[in-house]
Image: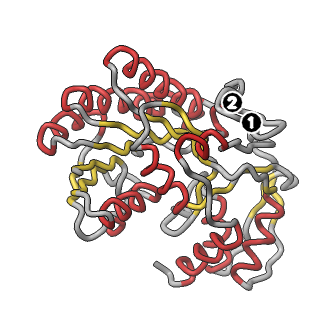
């Protein structure tokens, strides 16, 4: 198939591009390189530099893709709080431009959304019908984009799919910025710095390996619409995660405790049983195995 991966020079997008090439697809990476890296674009994929808010229609007109994995986004919760206008511009208006381009050319869309930021606090694994109580503009913008996608499916008979990710980790994750605690911990340990844990470290997340996320994305491309969680259903506290990261790296260093960040979720975990039933997908990589793979990449200093 001819496929476009928006944000394909980034962490998850570059892994999606790898998988598409491995199965023989024609792959076009669409990225403005504001956070993605040119070196992440795999050999065999064609890189198109551009912004989804301005250039989606022209790119789709040139490529005429059958399939689009839409991962280009503003992903930093803190940025969404400081600049909600920017967050909405990229995540809502940008997605609308991609939707319009996909409608014009009959392209199937698989949208990268978020679980924790949409559901808010979780007392138990959240299924897709869990109350949606985002605590930051980032979650609101992703939810708004999902609703536009659902409306386009109803209005135009398209079969676009939205995937609500847990906390994705793995090789190529950016260790700089607010997102990606695994990458931040590993980068600090490798470079001889002291990792920081905000609050008491009891806050939990659902950590899912990037390779499993890619498998879910490819499976979703065969589905006729819907919203699916992509997680493990397992809560891991930040304290426990740091212990596991230390074991994976064979480096022991006491973390620095920092004040809790206002508005941070305390519990986030996803119920992915719907994806198992309808997509035939479930996570294959354990947290410890995924951390070992991720550390090998960081240790290589790539």
Q: In the depicted view, which residue is nearer to us: 91 or 288?
A: 288
Q: Earlier in the sequence, mark 1 or mark 2?
A: 2
Q: Residue at x 48, y 67 (%)?
A: 172
Q: Where does label 2 land, which residue?
A: 135
| Secondary structure under the numbered disc 1 in the rendered image | loop
Task: State whether residue 40 is above or below residue 10.
Answer: below
Q: In the depicted view, which residue is nearer to us: 184 or 238?
A: 238
Image quadrant in which you'd find residue 105: top left
Q: In the depicted view, which residue is nearer to us: 295 or 284?
A: 284
Q: Where does label 1 land, which residue?
A: 263
Give the x, y percent position of residue 225. Answer: 44, 31
> Callout 1: 10 Å neighbours few (<14), some, many (20+)?
few
Indicate which label's residue lies in the foreground, 1 or 2: 2
Q: In the depicted view, which residue is nearer to us: 92 or 101?
A: 101
| Secondary structure under the numbered disc 2 in the rendered image | loop
Give the x, y percent position of residue 240. Answer: 82, 64
C-alpha gap between disc 1 and disc 2: 7 Å
Q: Residue at x 26, y 70 (%)?
A: 43
Q: Are marks 1 and 2 in contact (CB under 8 Å)?
A: yes
Give the x, y percent position of residue 288. Answer: 71, 71
Task: State whether residue 151 is above or below residue 67.
Answer: above
Give the x, y percent position of residue 92. Answer: 42, 28
> Callout 2: 10 Å neighbours few (<14), some, many (20+)?
some
Image quadrant in which you'd find residue 63: top left
Image quadrant in which you'd find residue 18: bottom left
Q: Is residue 177 left or right of residue 258?
A: left
Q: Is residue 23 left or right of residue 234?
A: left
Q: Residue at x 50, y 81 (%)?
A: 301
Count of labels in the image = 2
């Amino acid at each position: 198939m001819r496929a476009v991966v928006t944000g394909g020079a980034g962490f998850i997008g570059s892994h999606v591009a790898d998988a598409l090439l491995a199965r023989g697809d024609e792959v076009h990476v669409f990225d403005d390189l504001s956070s993605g890296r040119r070196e992440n674009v795999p050999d065999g994929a064609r890189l198109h530099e551009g912004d989804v808010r301005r250039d989606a229609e022209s790119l789709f007109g040139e490529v005429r893709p059958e399939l689009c994995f839409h991962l280009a986004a503003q992903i930093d919760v803190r940025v969404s709080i400081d600049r909600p206008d920017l967050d909405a511009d990229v995540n809502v208006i940008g997605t609308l431009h991609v939707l319009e381009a996909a409608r014009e050319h009959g392209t199937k869309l698989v949208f990268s959304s978020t679980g924790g930021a949409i559901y808010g606090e979780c007392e138990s694994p959240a299924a897709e019908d869990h109350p949606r109580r985002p605590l930051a503009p980032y979650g609101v913008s992703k939810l708004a984009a999902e609703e536009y996608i659902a409306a386009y499916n109803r209005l135009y008979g398209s079969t676009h799919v939205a995937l609500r990710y847990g906390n994705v980790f793995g090789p190529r994750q950016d260790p700089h910025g607010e997102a990606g605690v695994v990458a931040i911990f590993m980068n600090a340990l490798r470079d001889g710095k002291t990792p920081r844990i905000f609050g008491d470290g009891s806050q939990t997340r659902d950590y899912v390996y990037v390779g499993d996320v890619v498998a879910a994305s490819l499976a979703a491309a065969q589905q006729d619409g819907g919203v699916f969680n992509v997680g493990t259903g397992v809560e891991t506290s930040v304290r426990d995660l740091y212990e596991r990261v230390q074991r994976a790296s064979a480096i022991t260093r006491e973390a620095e405790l920092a004040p809790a960040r206002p508005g941070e979720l305390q519990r986030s975990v996803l119920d992915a049983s719907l994806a198992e039933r309808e997509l035939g997908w479930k996570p294959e990589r354990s947290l410890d195995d995924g951390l070992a793979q991720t550390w090998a990449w960081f240790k290589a200093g790539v």
